[in-house]
Image (tube, helix red, strand yellow):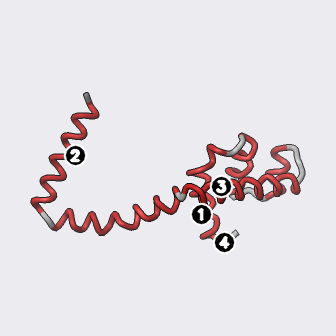
Amino acid sequence: MKLEQHLYMGTLLDFYGGMLTQNQQKITRSYVDFNASLSEIAEQNGTTRQAVSDVLRRSIKKMQDLENALQLVAKYHSILNKIPAIASKITTDQILQQKINFEFEQLLKTLED
């Protein structure tokens, strides 16, 4: 698996891993987070390499189907891409910065109550 695909799978797992069965989560996390081979995962779980491959294939498909329907990862990346532009505007406009700081302080006070 290429690095870009691996990172994407990790993101899908972070967003949709909770929608997988415990077994699917365990196997997929071993593969994505710990870079374990199919053989290693099979040995750890007392199953075959083919069974691990099948679980991974189903898990990945389920997460991709969820992403196609919900678009949470796409929305997350869209927001991340906007942050630098917003941050640069905030730091160059002192009045706006003061207003944002005040609103943020009010929000924090509300959360503390």
Disc 1 from disc 2: Cα separation: 32 Å
Residue indicated by mark 1:
8
The residue lying at 59 percent from left, 63 percent from top is: 7
Q: Which mark is residue 104?
A: 2
Q: Residues within 10 Å of mark 1 (few under 14, many from 20)?
A: some
- The label nearer to you, 3 versus 2, is 3
Name the secondary structure under disc 1.
Answer: helix
Vertical placement of 12 versus 5: above or below?
above
Which label's residue is closer to the chain start, 1 or 2?
1
User: Element at badge 2?
Assistant: helix
Which residue corresponds to mark 3? Answer: 63
Look at the numbered disc 3 and give the secondary structure of its residue.
helix
Compared across the picture, whether 13 is left or right of 37 comes to left
Residue furthest out toward the top: 113
Q: CA distance from mark 3 to mark 2?
A: 35 Å
Q: Earlier in the sequence, mark 3 or mark 2?
A: 3
- Mark whose residue sits in front, 4 or 3: 3
Task: Mark 3 or mark 1: name the one nearer the start of the chain.
Answer: 1
Quadrant where the N terminus lies? Answer: bottom right
Task: Say what secondary structure mark 4 lies in.
Answer: loop
> Going 79% across and 52% down the picture, which residue do you hit?
55
Q: Is residue 34 above or below residue 20?
A: below
What's the amino acid at mark 2? Phe
71 displayed left or right of 96: right
Residue 66 position, x and y percent, is 62, 54
Q: Which callout, 4 or 2, points at the residue further toward the start of the chain?
A: 4
Q: Nearer the viewer, residue 21 or 7?
A: 21
Query: Which callout, 1 or 4, points at the residue further toward the start of the chain?
Result: 4
Please identify the quarter of the rendering in which residue 60 is found: bottom right
Within 10 angstroms of label 2, few (less than 14), some, or many (20 or more) residues? few
Residue 81 lies, in percent from the top left, at 40, 67
